[in-house]
Image (spheres, helix red, strand yellow):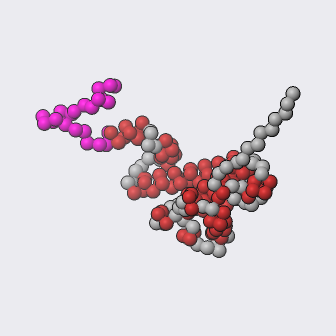
Amino acid sequence: MEESKVFTDVRGTLGYMDPEYMTNAKLTCASDVYSFGIVALQILSGKRVIELDLDARDHLTRKAKDVILEKRPLSDFEDPRLNGNLNVDDFKAILHVAVLCVAKSSKGRPTIHVVFDELDKAWKNTVSNMTARVRSEYNLSTPPSKSMELAETWPDNPEIEQQQQQSAPQPASEDGTAITTMGDQAS
């Protein structure tokens, strides 16, 4: 029986590669967490993927850490296209998770489950704040729990679509009778 060996080279963009992989050539779940952290930092900062080499990666992670340590203002890191229009607490929470993901040592990185839980908390907080803001702006009386439920499934929520249809002016023919649409005829 002959033995065969398969050698594979991991390929990819250097800026996403786990520093530990670059020294020991072993990919782990923590390597994926590292790469995710780099992607998250890019999204938060608005830096383009193609601009990311090792020096740019190191600069991006250092800048993010400085913001977390309050050595720099948040505005130094946020995507300028946001024009300051963001939930600062949730942005900082996501930035903090991303910084943990890009720890040089895999031992300092959270598991993907922890990352998911933290991002989920930030998302739910953002949705809650957005819902409250919309309720306030439009003087809506829907209870917060119902607003949250509607917001979590919006825009694919039939209840919202029904509310929008009921509040929208109905088209009428010249004699004033309602005009039905194909959707109205199907029910």
In the rendering, at what x and y percent does residue 36 appear? 64, 52
Tell me if residue 109 comes above or below residue 72 in the rendering: above
Q: Considering only vertical position in the picture, is 50 above or below 165?
A: below
Residue 68 visible, this orientation: no
* Residue 92 x/y as whole percent: 60, 62
Identify the residue at the far left of this view.
175
In this picture, which residue range is highlighted in magenta? 166-187
Residue in view at x 73 percent, y 51 percent:
30
Residue 59: percent from left, percent from top: 64, 68
Please identify the dominant SS of the magenta region. Answer: loop
- Residue sticking out furthest to the right: 1
Quadrant for residue 62, please give it: bottom right
The one nearer the camera, 10 or 130, is 10
Q: Position of residue 123 (x, y in %)?
A: 56, 51
Residue pushed farthest top?
A: 186
Query: Which quadrant is the C terminus positioned in?
Result: top left
- In the figure, 175 relative to 150: above or below? above
Task: Please indicate whether residue 45 sits to the left or right of residue 147 in the image.
Answer: right
**Camera-side residue of 39 and 142:** 39
| Residue beneath the point at 56% across and 71% down | 76
The residue at 53%/54% (across/down) is: 126
Q: Residue at x 63, y 54 (%)?
A: 13
Quadrant location of the N terminus in the rendered image: top right
Residue 154 in the magenta stretch? The answer is: no
Residue 154 visible: yes
Where residue 106 sits, quadrant-wise, is bottom right
Reply above or below: 103 against 6. Answer: below
